[in-house]
Amino acid sequence: MNAEESSAAPQVAGPPVATLACTSCQLVYQPDLAAFESGRTGCPRCGGWTWIAQLRTAAEGGDW
């Protein structure tokens, strides 16, 4: 292995996993991708605004 190969970031398989947090009730959750496809991006508990709290790959695990 040469220096270039050892400094390269490892390849991680799997789709990204988003963790969202609600601005109203502070619920932290992982959204269902099907909900995003249909345009439902609000908090599942209260319908409030959400923001990305964390973005990881599936291989890293999706737990908060």
Image (spheres, rainbow, N blue to C red):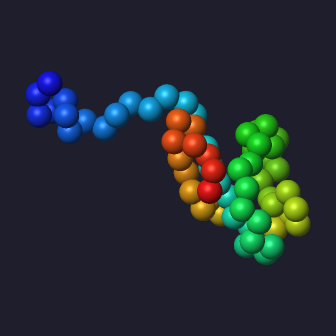
Quick one: which residue is furthest to the right in this view? 46
- In the rendered image, is residue 57 in sight? no
Q: Which residue sits furthest top?
A: 1
Q: Is residue 28 left or right of residue 40?
A: left
Residue at 57% x, 37% y is: 58
Q: Position of residue 63 (x, y in %)?
A: 63, 50
**Residue 64 visible, this angle:** yes
Number of callouts: 0
The x, y position of residue 37, in whole percent, is: 76, 39
As drawn, 52 above or below 23:
above
Q: Residue 34, image x and y in percent?
A: 79, 37
> Residue drawn 81% across and 68% down?
48
Tell me which corner region of the image, top left, top right, bottom left or bottom right, holds residue 4.
top left
Q: What residue do we see at 74% from left, 48% from top?
A: 31
- Which of these two is toward me, 30 or 34? 30
**Residue 24, placed above or below residue 3:** below
Residue appearing at x 85%, y 57% in the figure: 44
Give residue 1's quadrant in the image. top left
Residue lying furthest left in this view? 2
Q: Quadrant of the C terminus?
A: bottom right
